[in-house]
Amino acid sequence: MDIATMTQFFKCCSIINVSILVISSIICSLFSGFAYNVNNKLFSLGLSKEEHNQIIYKILGYYKIVIIVFNVVPYFALCCCISN
């Protein structure tokens, strides 16, 4: 696999994962009450709304870090390799 193919792969992965992150963030911020009710009925976690929102935003934050480390940084590193 050559550098150009890997660069294209990481570019596509980054676009897909950032899109998922943005859509998830919008849904969680607009429909937080609905998400809380669904999760409470499905999993019976017994959490308050504040605890539920904190957990959801922590998960989104961890997902953002994973996207940056495993998709965006390798993409930019490969772009730097191609330009030299």
Image: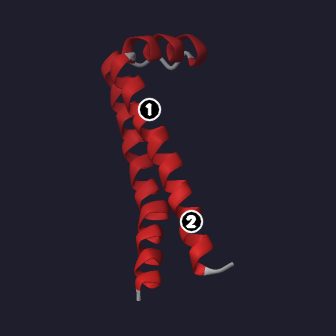
Outermost residue toward the bottom?
84
Colour setting: secondary structure
From the viewer's side, name the closer residue of 13 and 29.
Answer: 13
Q: Residue furthest left?
A: 50
Picture residue at 46% right of the left edge, 41% below the top? 19
Local secondary structure at mark 1: helix
Residue sitting nearer the eye, 16 or 82: 82
Residue contact at pointers 2 and 1, CB within 8 angstroms: no
User: Mark 1: which amino acid?
Assistant: Ile
Q: Residues within 10 Å of mark 1 (few under 14, many from 20)?
A: few
Q: Quadrant of residue 34?
A: top left
Say which residue label 1 marks.
23
Q: CA distance from mark 2 to mark 1?
A: 23 Å
Label 2 crowd (10 A; few <14 / some 14-19 / many >=20):
some
Q: Left or right? Give the position of 39 relative to 25.
A: right
**In the depicted structure, whether residue 31 falls above or below residue 56:** above
Query: Eyeballing the image, is 26 above or below 6?
Result: above
Residue 84 position in % (x across, y down): 41, 89
Please give the name of the residue rendered at 37% of the width and 39% of the height, measured from the top-left corner.
Answer: 58
Tell me which residue sits at (58%, 79%) in the image: 3
At label 2, the amino acid type is: Gln
Residue 59 horizontal/vertical position (percent): 43, 40
**x, y percentage for residue 42?**
60, 15
Where residue 54 sits, quadrant-wise, is top left
Task: Indicate the quadrant containing the N terminus: top left, top right, bottom left or bottom right.
Answer: bottom right
* Foreground of the two, 8 or 56: 8
Considering only vertical position in the picture, is 48 above or below 76?
Answer: above
Check disc 2 and report its element: helix, strand or loop: helix
Residue assigned mark 2: 8
